[in-house]
Image: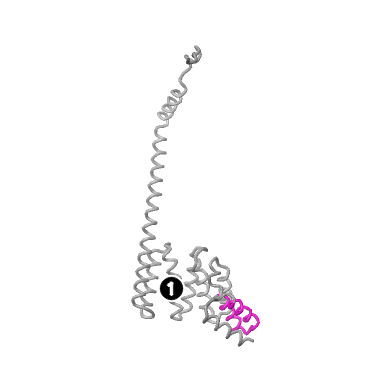
Amino acid sequence: MAAKMDKHELNEPDKLQLFFLRIRAFAGKHRARIYAGGGIFILIVLLAGGWYLYRVNYQAGAGKIYNQIIEAAAKTGSPAGDAAAIKGYKDLISQYPRSRAAVTAYYRLGNLYFGRREYDAAIGAYQNFLRNTSAESDLMPLAYSGLGASQEAKNDLNKALESYDLAMKTRAAPSFEALNYSNIARIYETKKDSVKAAEFYRKALEKTTDPLMTLYLKRKLSILG
């Protein structure tokens, strides 16, 4: 049997009804502000969505051009297609400077300039890549190695050694340890420091699984004694 309601409960206003009445009163009093706030919220949502779509299209457009340059270079081959590839990468960087493809294009430019023995241009391209890429990039140790090789080619051995050392400190360095140790050893050999050169050639030998690299390193160690 249902419990009886006392006189006080019968006379008490419906709390839920009062709550909604207060909301209506507040909305009526502050209607202009509510409309303005709602409009601002919708505008923010539209701007955020538009920016997201712009970034997606921006990255896609840059990636499409980057792929076209790669395909054209593969068809033409090196060195015949190098000049066209360099122009293509430079145009890509100019049109889409904040794209991921533009960052990778700097690395590609470094390799192309190095192959053409344009070492100053190669150094600039590698440095631009390293300034703009993510610390997680697998290309970082290769870019530092390319930078070091360009500096080594200019006989700037101290800077080259610094670049090779930085290559060893990147996240992806373990995949290129034999190469990096060999590069460092070569610099010390050029500097006539046979003890340090032998030390790093041995480290490279411990890390390599390449038969040709193994023969090269053993030959170096035999020469150094």
Residue that sits furthest to the right in the current view? 195
Q: For the residue carrying disc 1, how many other residues have a C-alpha within 10 Å: few (<14), some (14-19), or many (20+)?
A: many
| Residue extent of the magenta highlight | 180-205
Residue that sits furthest to the top in the current view? 7
Q: Amino acid at mark 1?
A: Leu
> To which quarter of the image does residue 161 belong?
bottom right
User: In the rendered image of this protein, does residue 48 appear above or below residue 90?
Assistant: above
Residue pictured at 62% horizontal, 86% vertical: 224
What percent of the width, then of the height, locates residue 125? 46, 72
Q: How many labels sit on residues? A: 1
User: In the rendered image of this protein, does residue 92 appear above or below residue 24?
Assistant: below
Whether the magenta-drawn stretch holds residue 148 is answered as no
Which quadrant does the C terminus fall into?
Answer: bottom right
What percent of the width, then of the height, locates residue 133? 49, 65
Look at mark 1 in the image and give the residue it sits on: 109
Give the structural element (helix, strand or loop) at label 1.
helix
